[in-house]
């Protein structure tokens, strides 16, 4: 039990003993710098249960706490704030209990623990991954790691959108204009090659539209009658009918894309436990629609189409099956969710990492699954996130103006190289060491910049400002970690044993307090599906360490016990930075 929980229990107990009244909760806040104390109890909310002078109530409770909590050595009351002074021995005992715990803050799943499925990435196989996918992947991966660290079993998954008219556009353009070229013959990654033909389709399609408009057709009719779009539609019908030639081309081009995706995922440092493919799942859900129709969850209109009435929930009627019996997106998503619950029966919660333009879709999906009677539907969550913009403006895949994920990773390494060279930070490194470090710094900058922001907020991403060695950035935190490793390498004495009796410096105490928050921060980040909580905690920890580093001597300290505790504290801060950054998918360098 941490000190706040101990004090909360005793404040409630004291309030009952002194005033014969129960209070449901106790409000805490950090003690202001100008007052003595380590934890502050806010007295004002207690006035709802006991009328009186807040200062007097603070005095009464303060006396009770000092008498009944051995860890508290004194108190002072300022207006309605009760500032409690915690004994150094409490902080020393706590620190000794976590110092050798290499996974401090993490909770491990119990046997038979219910699992959570986290879906992310879910790309289309007609183009490479771009900046938007980068935010999606980093968020989904990090949330999965945080939920795992909070004590739950996690499955990471994606559904690959490998069918539909947009896939046929790339296939048709390659057939018409590709002259048989392959990733091997061009030296291009497969996803890039296929993406080029998606852009090529759009360019040629626009030319056809312009010609038809020039011949007197309206633009609307020209878009429908252009030969390329008619051929793409015909190709889709052939795919759905199982045409051998179309299927063979589809499989070959998709394989090119998957091999390309694998390279990007490896470079980004994300992985998956199970993959689903839209080509396998797009018919799923039809059985559920039939069952729902019979049970009255859905209703049929005169044209034969099937709908769900969500007006009682403040939404509209939602189409779930077309009049010709073909599935819509929601049909597939209903079927896929049900299939996943069969494939992984221990799953009792699913997190969908999808951009905020799909907010309404997921509201509808979750309501329909609830109406169909699935108990796990109450544990579904849409991890909705904002777009990522660049100073240059909005991206469009079909026009080829997207920021390619691979190019971005390379650009981040290059930016890290330029800034490191400017600062002269890497003197004495071999070229190989420098290259590896540029990638670690560049990727760390990218990931931290994206993950430190609340997922719901839109981001304007500027590569240069993200690779800053000052302020709330990945490289600043990585640099602090490397600085601590340097201290540890220079500590040429045994600092392994516990120190039990010593007077702590104020900065040492503040650092231990910050470390004490880590387990709670992980739980909070998991409950809120927010890596930003981990990122900003780590930045606060680093700021606290740098203040400690500037105010106390570590290796220059004359008293051996003080020197030992300061090296131990430094090491524990580094370990915690590393553990926190693991949850964000960020590496930390031993030297910098």
Image (cartoon, helix red, strand yellow):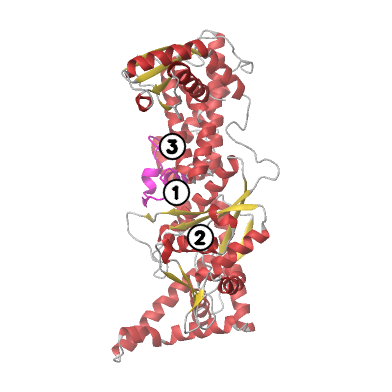
Q: Which mark is residue 412?
A: 1
Q: Nearer the viewer, mark 1 or mark 2?
A: 2
Determine crowd level at label 2: few under 14, some 14-19, many 20+ residues with C-alpha closer than 10 A.
many
For the residues labelled 3 and 2, say whether their Cβ atoms are less than 8 Å apart: no
Determine the secondary structure under disc 2.
helix
Determine crowd level at label 3: few under 14, some 14-19, many 20+ residues with C-alpha closer than 10 A.
some
In front of the other: 128 or 541: 541
Which residues, given as a range, are shown in magenta?
A: 447-474
The vertical placement of 113 against 428, above or below, is: below
Q: Which mark is residue 536?
A: 3
* Residue closest to the far right: 111
- For disc 2, the marked residue is 366
Q: Which mark is residue 252?
A: none
The vertical placement of 386 against 86, above or below, is: below
Mark found first going from the N terminus, 1 or 2 = 2
Tell me which residue sits at (50%, 29%) in the image: 517
Can residue 550 be seen? yes
Whole-percent x, y for residue 418 in the image: 41, 43
Whole-percent x, y for residue 448 in the image: 45, 43
Q: Determine which quarter of the picture holds residue 83.
A: top left
Q: Quadrant of the N terminus?
A: top right
Q: Is residue 449 magenta?
A: yes
Q: Is residue 257 magenta?
A: no
Question: Horizontal placement of 239 versus 415: left or right?
Answer: right
Tell me which residue sits at (44%, 34%) in the image: 539
């Amino acid at each position: 039990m941490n000190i706040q929980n101990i004090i909360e229990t005793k404040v409630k107990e004291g309030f009952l003993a002194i005033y014969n009244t129960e209070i449901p909760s106790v409000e805490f806040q950090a003690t202001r710098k100008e007052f003595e104390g380590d934890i502050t109890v806010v007295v004002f909310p207690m006035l709802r249960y006991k009328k009186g002078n807040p200062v007097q109530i603070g005095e009464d409770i303060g006396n009770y706490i000092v008498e009944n909590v051995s860890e508290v050595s004194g108190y002072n009351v300022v207006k309605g704030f009760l500032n409690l002074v915690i004994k150094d021995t409490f902080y020393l005992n706590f620190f000794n209990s976590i110092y050798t715990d290499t996974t401090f803050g993490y909770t491990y799943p119990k046997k038979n623990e219910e699992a959570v499925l986290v879906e992310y990435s879910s790309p289309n196989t007609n183009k490479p991954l771009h900046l938007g996918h980068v935010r999606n992947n980093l968020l989904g991966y990090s949330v999965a790691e945080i939920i795992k660290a909070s004590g739950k079993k996690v499955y990471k998954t994606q559904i690959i959108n490998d069918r539909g008219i947009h896939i046929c556009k790339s296939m048709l353009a390659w057939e018409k204009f590709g002259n048989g070229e392959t990733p091997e013959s061009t030296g291009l990654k497969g996803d890039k090659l296929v993406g080029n033909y998606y852009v090529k389709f759009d360019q040629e399609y626009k030319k056809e539209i312009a010609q038809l408009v020039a011949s007197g057709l309206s633009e609307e009719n020209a878009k429908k009658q252009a030969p390329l779009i008619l051929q793409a539609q015909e190709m889709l019908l052939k795919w759905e009918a199982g045409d051998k030639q179309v299927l063979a081309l589809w499989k070959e081009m998709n394989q090119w894309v998957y091999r390309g995706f694998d390279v990007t995922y490896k470079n980004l440092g994300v992985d998956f436990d199970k993959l689903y493919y839209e080509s396998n799942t797009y018919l799923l859900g039809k059985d559920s629609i039939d069952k729902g129709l019979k049970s009255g969850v859905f209703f049929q209109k005169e044209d034969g189409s099937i709908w769900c009435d969500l007006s009682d929930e403040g939404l509209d009627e939602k189409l779930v099956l077309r009049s010709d019996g073909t599935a819509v997106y929601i049909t597939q998503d209903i079927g896929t969710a049900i299939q996943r619950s069969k494939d992984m029966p221990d799953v009792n919660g699913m997190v969908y990492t999808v951009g905020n333009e799909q907010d309404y879709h997921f509201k509808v999906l979750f309501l329909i699954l609830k109406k169909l009677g699935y108990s796990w539907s109450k544990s579904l969550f849409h991890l909705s996130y904002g777009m990522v913009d660049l100073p240059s403006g909005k991206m469009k895949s079909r026009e080829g103006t997207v920021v390619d994920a691979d190019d971005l990773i390379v650009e981040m390494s290059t930016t890290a190289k330029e800034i490191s060279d400017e600062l002269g930070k890497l003197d004495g490194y071999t070229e190989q060491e420098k290259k590896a470090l540029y990638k670690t710094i560049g990727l760390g900058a990218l990931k931290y910049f994206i993950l430190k922001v609340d997922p719901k907020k839109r981001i304007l991403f500027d590569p240069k400002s993200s690779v800053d060695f000052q302020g709330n950035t990945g490289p600043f935190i990585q640099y602090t970690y490397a600085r601590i490793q340097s201290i540890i390498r220079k500590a040429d004495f045994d600092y392994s044993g516990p120190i039990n009796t010593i007077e702590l410096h104020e900065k040492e105490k503040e650092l231990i307090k910050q470390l004490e928050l880590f387990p709670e921060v992980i739980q909070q980040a998991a409950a809120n599906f927010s890596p930003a909580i981990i990122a900003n905690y780590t930045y606060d920890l680093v700021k606290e360490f740098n203040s400690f580093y500037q105010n106390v001597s570590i290796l220059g300290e004359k008293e051996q016990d003080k020197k030992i505790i300061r090296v131990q504290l430094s090491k524990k801060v580094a370990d915690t930075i590393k553990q926190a950054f693991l949850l964000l998918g960020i590496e930390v360098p031993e030297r910098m």
